[in-house]
Amino acid sequence: MNVAIEKNKIGKINKINKTRYALLGMLFDSQMSGYEIKQFMLGSTANFWKESDASIYPMLKILEKEGMVASKSELKGKRESRKFEITDAGKKEFLEWMGKTTEKESRRNELLLKLFFGKNVNPEESIKKLHLRLAKVKKEYEQFIDIQDNVLAKLPDDYPNKIFWSITLRNGILLTEAEIKWIVESIKALKKLL
Amino acid sequence: MNVAIEKNKIGKINKINKTRYALLGMLFDSQMSGYEIKQFMLGSTANFWKESDASIYPMLKILEKEGMVASKSELKGKRESRKFEITDAGKKEFLEWMGKTTEKESRRNELLLKLFFGKNVNPEESIKKLHLRLAKVKKEYEQFIDIQDNVLAKLPDDYPNKIFWSITLRNGILLTEAEIKWIVESIKALKKLL
DNA sequence: TTGAACATGTAAACGGTTACATGATTTA
DNA sequence: TAAATCATGTAACCGTTTACATGTTCAA
């Protein structure tokens, strides 16, 4: 049942679909609907993990078919809310994934690509791009600080998730700080060309 | 001819294929074969941009069909080397892309997801994962410094690409430093749980 | 002589997103 | 009463990678 080692017709080892683990992880503690999972992700893991509707709902159905989760439909008025609960098999699969080593997926960064090709355009264009990014990154940074001060800081110290959520948030803060530093430095360097 | 605004049957705006711009950018200064482009990317942009064979060769053909590049096959002995040259139309399309603003593509980070779910496993497992990542990131960092000291530093200061390549490299250095700091800090925090 | 690097390419498949579709409920 | 949010779901499509395929040249 381990999809990670399943092969297709031409013997290719399929890349593992990680949506399943993200969903199983979210359901590990509490029953949630697809909608609730999405909302929770937006408020917690959005900086490093998001899922779209078109990934969540079909995957929950697949997981149910596989016996990894079970669901019951609750009606709030006439509105459906299908709550999903993880099964023992689901917990097992999730923990197996947790135990595996993780490869860093090298990522594409279009801004860096454009800066790399910078000699082909007016330096002011590159500077403008960096300023635009700076504004966005600063906003992101403020949001991280806000979560740190107004959400995480208010959780009791014995809240089991606190340290883990703090660590992932801290990643966002430190990486964002570094990016701000890099942008400021880069703008300064490019201005010498004007 | 601008693929960015082309729509499909259901009116969906297609995500733009950025491989074309990466290739056009690489060809902006000098004629290169697909193989040479790949090698050059591995030695310069790998940290933020890579392309696989299966993206490069077909895309070069498409670009040629569209009149964005032109090619001639050189024979080195019996081995073919198809050199591609950018056309004026290709330069135009590349520069249009360069002028566009760039959205940050939010990226998935599996390590962070696993750490976020950390309360479900022994803290030692999370620490182990961080140690593994630390070793890799440190190696990456050393490679950046090596390029900085032994490649970029040796380019003459009036080499037109120097400042742009320095900026992108500096991004790698600063972000990697921040990640190392984060990992060390996180390991320390998690050890308190033991 | 054998393996690494050079060199170009294709088939198959999966991952993931955007837009579409539908309707209920709350809020301004 | 209109817009935003709640809530679930599907169709279509594109992007990208992995593995396969083929052959040459060079170095150990």
Image: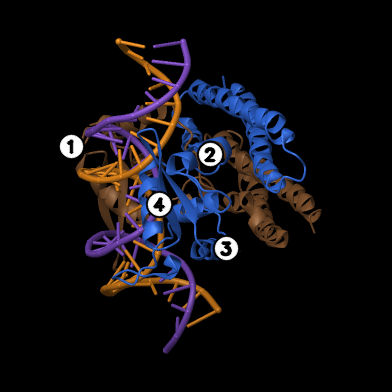
Chain colours: A brown, B blue, C orange, D purple
CA–CA distance between discs 1 and 3?
A: 42 Å
Q: Is residue A55 above or below residue B44?
A: below
Same chain shared by disc 4 and disc 2: yes
CA–CA distance between discs 1 and 4?
A: 28 Å
Q: Secondary structure at mark 2?
A: helix
The quadrant in which the N terminus of chain B is found is bottom left
- Please give the chain letter of the residue carrying mark 3: B
Depth order, front residue of B33/A21: B33
**What label sits on residue B60 in the rendered view?**
4
CA–CA distance between discs 1 and 2?
A: 34 Å
Q: Amino acid at mark 4?
A: Leu
Q: Residues within 10 Å of mark 3 (few under 14, many from 20)?
A: some
Check if mark 3's residue and mark 4's residue have beta carbons within 8 Å: no
Q: Amino acid at mark 2?
A: Phe
Q: Position of residue A25 (x, y in %)?
A: 40, 39
The residue carrying mark 2 is: B40
CA–CA distance between discs 4 and 2?
A: 16 Å
Q: Which residue is found at the position 42% from the left and 63% from the top?
A: B67
- Please give the chain letter of the residue carrying mark 1: A
The residue carrying mark 3 is: B95
Check if mark 1's residue and mark 2's residue have beta carbons within 8 Å: no
Check if mark 2's residue and mark 3's residue have beta carbons within 8 Å: no
Q: Amino acid at mark 3?
A: Leu
CA–CA distance between discs 3 and 4?
A: 18 Å
Q: Position of residue A99 (x, y in %)?
A: 40, 25
Same chain shared by disc 1 and disc 3: no
CA–CA distance between discs 2 and 3?
A: 21 Å
Label whose residue precedes the other's in the sequence (4 or 2):
2
Same chain shared by disc 3 and disc 4: yes
Check if mark 1's residue and mark 3's residue have beta carbons within 8 Å: no
Q: Secondary structure at mark 3?
A: helix
**What label sits on residue A9 in the rendered view?**
1
